[in-house]
Image: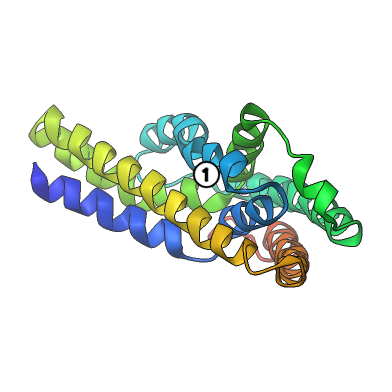
Amino acid sequence: MWSYVLIGAGFAFAAAVQPGPFQTFLMSETLTRGWRRTVPAAFAPLLSDAPIVVVALLVLTRVPGEMVRFLHLAGAVFLFYLTWGAWCSWRRFDAVDMQEAATGPRTIFKAALVNFLNPNPWLGWSLVMGPIFLTGYREAPGHGAALIVGFYVTMVTCLIGLIGLFAFARQLGPRVRRVMVGFSVFALAAFGVYQLWLGVWGWSPQS
């Protein structure tokens, strides 16, 4: 059983620390709203992954190509929306804006939507976690449960750690925070363009 816990934890760590739209969203939210209101977003995968896991397990080893294409396009649209919000925050950046933060529930649902529209969890569950879960579950249901527990405990812990790192950067002063918010604008836009490219030109039924 512990081997499945370690497998889930290892994959979660790799997924949490690699740069991506969700991590960029956490950075932008932490810098503009503060870590206290961003921490609930670390639990967003617990909400967004439920339908992802169901679909991935139903198709066993891969998500249908058309769904991947739709996720790329929908993700691009939403990332451009987040880019606009981050751009507005950068332009009117001041101490007052830092106090006008969104509520926890709004943050977690917004983060869940970002993660749901990110193809990485879909592909990760359909190509990696899904097959491992089915193998473990066939050996013993507890093995499958251990995989999921190890994965999500590690995922949430790592995301909270990332928020802590972004919060430390936030304490370095308003100029540094504004520069990093500007970076998040660029990063979100770049992810949006990349998602759009994958959805329009980079996708094929064989991919």
Residue drawn at (58%, 52%) of the image: 22
Residue drawn at (66%, 52%) of the image: 72
Residue drawn at (45%, 51%) of the image: 159
Between 4 and 107, the one lying in front of the other is: 107
Q: How is the image coloured?
A: rainbow
Residue drawn at (31%, 42%) of the image: 153
- Give left or right: position of 70 versus 154: right
Q: x, y percentage for residue 117? A: 62, 44
How many marks the image carries: the answer is 1
Q: Quadrant of residue 156?
A: top left
Which three-letter amino acid code belongs to the residue tagged 1?
Answer: Pro
Between 16 and 204, the one lying in front of the other is: 16
- Give left or right: position of 142 versus 42: left
Can you say which quadrant of the picture contains the N terminus?
top left
Decide: is 126 above or below 59. below
- Give left or right: position of 33 versus 10: right
Q: Secondary structure at mark 1?
A: loop
Q: x, y percentage for residue 11? A: 31, 56
For the residue carrying disc 1, how many other residues have a C-alpha within 10 Å: few (<14), some (14-19), or many (20+)?
some
Is residue 61 shown to the viewer in this render? yes
Q: x, y percentage for residue 44? A: 52, 37
Q: x, y percentage for residue 108? A: 59, 34
Is residue 81 shown to the viewer in this render? no
- Give left or right: position of 61 versus 95: left
Q: Quadrant of residue 99?
A: top right
Q: In this figure, which residue is indicated by the disc labeled 1?
A: 64
